[in-house]
Image: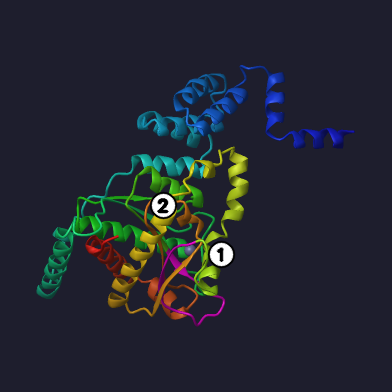
Amino acid sequence: MYLSRRKALLLLGSSCVSLLSGVAGASSGFDLGLQGQEFLAKGKFKEAIKVLQEAVKIEPNNEWLWGLLGRAYFQLKDMRAALSSFRKVLSLNPEDTYSRMMIDIISQKPLPPRREEKKKKLTPLEKKALEEERRIFAKLASKQGLGYNIKRIVLDPGHGGFDSGAVGLHRLEEKNVNLDVAKRTAQILNQYNSNLKIFFTRTEDYFVPLSARTTTANQYCADLFVSFHVNANRNRKPRGMETYFCSERASSKEAARVAKFENSVLKLEKTELVQKGYVDIEQILFLFERKRYWEAGGKVASYLQSALKKDLPLKNRGVHSANFYVLRRAKMPSILLELGFISNPEEERLLSHVDFRHKLAYSVAKGILALQNVTI
Ligand SMILES: [Zn+2]
């Protein structure tokens, strides 16, 4: 008897929620929360705020309600209110990575140019190298408008938090390399072109769902999305770097394997999304325009890979394409870099060195700046 009743409720799916809430009465915080969630999904943000404000009055310690309210404010660009709502969620549940990410996104500002340089005394040789470096970048930056005019870039350090990504023989974790190289890239980009607005999908070691990463990029209306990764293989021999762009079908078996690994965290995300009661954002995403973005992503990938191969002492593994979840919904050209193999002991050693990571960042930044001369 109990079983069949439970089954019946499950079969009712979403309609069972309204049946249950009907019993609880229209004024319950949960009920208002559901209404707010529905408004959010339909893009009716003002209506969502109205019911959610009522909901948090009834249940001021309900983190789910505060999270929904934060999202509604964020959509209406009321950043102050969004920030205080997401902070409220964190005060109730410090483990909520989504709110932490949103706080980070809202409070993020383009990075100021590096200052330590002035303080550091340079040798004549270093000074000359720096001048030369500046000259190259100034030349690249001055050619804006000839090709692809990039004003806003989202840098996406892959993995984070419980998702360490690939791990090397000596326990170097991919998530940390990705974050460090992405931050250095931003610093170098801003140093040479202070007009660029650079945003991150994460700035610390915490988990960010794949879906949230491209959503962030889309909200920022970025011109370019660059996802930073390091490759791995069960076999310790493979080495080198490659650049990916998104396509429906993988360009090779190896490309399919890499995409499968990078998409694998999705299994964990599903449960988290359901548990937290997030709206499925898939429905709001575009379908028609993406072919154009993917083609542009292919051009960016080719250009960047050829820039990297000139600069870096890593084997050139070329450009490939596959169905990467993190790229497929970006409303802009997007690429994914695999900067070496953490599973290869020699490359793991290189990747663990700050100097080498800086070199990687320098080459990526240089490649991005040079993109301005490419017609996409
Ligand atoms: Zn990865």
Q: Residues within 10 Å of mark 1 (few under 14, many from 20)?
A: some
Can you give x and y, in whole percent of width and height, for residue 310 in the image? 28, 77
Q: Is residue 13 above or below residue 213?
A: above
* Front residue of this view, candidates 120 and 304: 304
Q: Residue at x 57, y 76 (%)?
A: 234
Q: Does the rendering let one see residue 158?
A: yes
* Front residue of this view, candidates 153 and 188: 153
Give the labeled residue for mark 1: 260
Q: Amino acid at mark 2?
A: Glu
Helix, strand or loop at mark 2: loop
Q: Is residue 236 above or below residue 108?
A: below
Q: Which label sits in the foreground, 1 or 2?
A: 1
Can you give x and y, in whole percent of width and height, for residue 208 in the image? 48, 50
Asked whether, in this view, residue 36 is left or right of residue 82, the answer is right
Mark 1 and mark 2 lie on one chain; the one further toward the N terminus is 2
Q: Residue 186: within the magenta?
A: no
Q: Quadrant of the N terminus?
A: top right
Give the labeled residue for mark 2: 204
Determine the CA span between mark 1 and mark 2.
Answer: 25 Å
Can you give x and y, in whole percent of width and height, for residue 131 in the image? 11, 68
Q: Quadrant of the C terminus?
A: bottom left
Q: Residue at x 48, y 48 (%)?
A: 287
Q: Does the rendering let one see residue 95?
A: no
Q: Residue 243: within the magenta?
A: yes
Q: Which residues are magenta?
A: 229-247
Can you give x and y, in whole percent of width and height, for residue 176 in the image? 43, 61
- The image's colouring method is rainbow
Farthest right residue in view? 1
Q: Residue at x 71, y 24 (%)?
A: 19
